[in-house]
Image (cartoon, grey):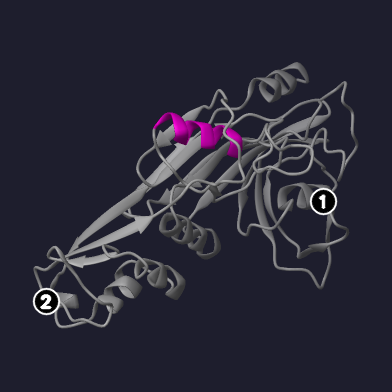
Amino acid sequence: MKRTIDFIVDDRFSGRTVYDILKEKFGMSGTLIKDLKKYGDGLMLNGEHIRTVDEVKSGDMLRIAIYDFASENIEPREMDLSVIYEDSDIIIVDKPSGIPTHPSFGHLYDTLANGIMAHYLKNGEEHVFRAVNRLDKDTSGLICIAKHSYAHARLCGGMHSGGIERRYMAIVTGVLRGSGTVNAPISRDSFIKRTVSPDGKRAVTHYRAVKAAEDCTLVELRLGTGRTHQIRVHMAHIGHPLLGDWLYGEENAEAFPRQALHSSYLSLAHPVTGERLCFTAGLPEDMERYINKSQ
């Protein structure tokens, strides 16, 4: 697939180079700029091929062509996807629990990636599967997928710079009241497990109790950083592990068969237009039923 982006040169870039525009206006890395040079129409000015070192003037029309190809190692598999939003650059999906994001040993054909590849195929599109925010298999809710390398780079940059805001809903064990912030560094404890450790990476989670029941609490959580298993580790650290979290709390499949965690809110700047987009996903039926039953 080819995604073209047009830019009318304004006064601030008049007399400057194409490279300046790619770096300052579009925030492109050296690798992305190098990729543009691979194709004859990767960089066009007023309909003619142009080099990154060439100067432009106000009113010129710069066209950027970004190429993408199908993920050959991910087999398309039809899946009932809940697509919240889609355009030429991104897809926002409300992922159900029980579905891994990426293929792995034991899950080669039943992942979100397989479903997205089938979605692309059905629409006559070819893209590499690029998840911006990754959700654990048992975590439900909003996930963003970029359709090309430029969108992915811009959005991942937003993940690290605070340009993307994520909120989660969770049911934690015990009664938790009020609000607060957990500022506790996280490091790797084993191949799978993480732990709070003084020599870990900075990790910040903000929480707010929404509804307390007899032995559990519905909590809204906002990420200040994005470490692996951050919410699960931090809630366990303050004595309120997530309901059903076999790794950081206690597994009780009869009470709740998964960690009760849902990605409920996602706000981001569109990677091409810069428009601020906000998406919400209501509490899934299993979590809604459990918190209401426990009151």
Q: Nearer the viewer, residue 295 or 161?
A: 161
Q: The C terminus lies in which quarter of the figure?
A: top right
Drawn side of residue 4 relative to residue 141, left or right: left
What x and y, as percent, mark residue 230? 72, 53
Q: Which residue is mark 2?
A: 57
What x and y, as percent, mark residue 151? 42, 55
Specify the amino acid type for callout 1: Ile
**Residue at figure coordinates x 73%, y 68% from the top left:** 201
Drawn side of residue 268 relative to residue 170, left or right: left
**Residue at figure coordinates x 51%, y 51% from the top left:** 165
Q: Tell me, yes or no, whether the highlighted magenta stretch contains residue 203.
A: no
Q: Which residues are magenta?
A: 113-123
Q: Which residue is mark 1?
A: 238
What x and y, as percent, mark residue 70? 49, 46
**Residue at figure coordinates x 77%, y 52% from the top left:** 234
| Mark 1 or mark 2, earlier in chain | 2
Drawn side of residue 13 relative to residue 183, left or right: left
Callout 1 environment at 10 Å: few (<14), some (14 to 19), or many (20+)? few
Q: Nearer the viewer, residue 32 or 228?
A: 32
- Which quadrant of the structure image shows residue 271? bottom left
